[in-house]
Amino acid sequence: MIRVLACVVALGFAGMADAACRQALALGLDVSGSVDAQEYRLQINGLAAALDNVAVRDALLSAPGVPVSVMVYEWSGPSDQAVVAPWTAIVDGSTLNGFIETLLQTARRDVSPGTALGTAMILGGQYLDQQPDCWKRTLDISGDGMSNLGPRPRDVKDAIGARGITVNALVIGASANASPQSETGALASYFRAEVITGPDAFVETALGFDDYEAAMTRKLLRELEMLAVSELIPD
């Protein structure tokens, strides 16, 4: 279904010669002090595995003439962010494999302990401004806690949304065996109220870092499917 819809969209927009891609995805990963070495690896490897999922690969490669462009960056304190994988147009399987390998080879940096979520959102919006010709631009923020440094997410999200950028979130809550799930629900509610913005914006939830791969897979499939439906317009 995703393949069919994406192909229909590609044909419907064939006249848009100036469009470089159908979607730009900037993925911001939380590497703040609350994320230990094992959790960091689960997050990076989980993203790599999600991108390598058969259904996600199919969605990404369904319309190579109008590819999805992807980049990944890490965030923590107000002045502590880094690009892990730069903008890459996923035009074929080899390109996707190379992007995945870059993630797998990434080693953790020494980072500050703060959680500057608003700053991370501003930075993600700036990265997406580098992709002005994409039909849709999406900022994905993963996080396991509320912002405690820098500008508040609620104070920056409207400016990002006004530039045509959708902000989605992947909340990493407590695992099913760790603590009450009400804590995870509260964190998801915070991201829903304070962080996400734009048409069809949503919050996906992972029950601990062990669940990150599955949650990221669900989120990517939903975003790519939503793109095909939302960009299909009548004559």
Image (tube, rainbow, N blue to C red):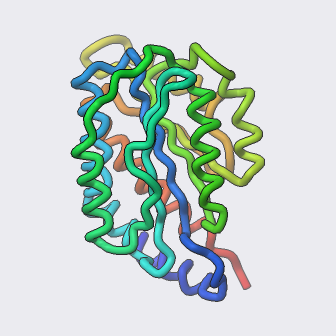
- 65 lies above or below 229: below
Residue 53 appears at what percent x and percent y? Answer: 26, 57
**Which residue is at 44% across, 17% downward?**
112
Residue 182 falls in which quadrant of the image? top left
| Nearer to me, 52 or 234 | 52
Residue 145 appears at what percent x and percent y? Answer: 48, 19
- Asked if residue 169 shows in the view, the reply is yes
Quadrant into which the C terminus falls: bottom right
Tell me how many marks there are.
0
Residue 212 falls in which quadrant of the image? top left
Q: Classify residue 139 as left or right of residue 18.
A: left
- Asked if residue 186 shows in the view, the reply is no
Q: Classify residue 95 as left or right of residue 151.
A: left
**Which residue is at 54% across, 18% downward?**
146
**Which residue is at 74% across, 27% downward?**
155
Residue 78 appears at what percent x and percent y? Answer: 57, 22
Q: Classify residue 157 as left or right of residue 68.
A: right
Residue 226 falls in which quadrant of the image? bottom right
Residue 174 appears at what percent x and percent y? Answer: 35, 19
- 83 lies above or below 18: above
Quadrant into which the N terminus falls: bottom left
- 129 lies above or below 149: below
**Which residue is at 47% across, 71% downward?**
67
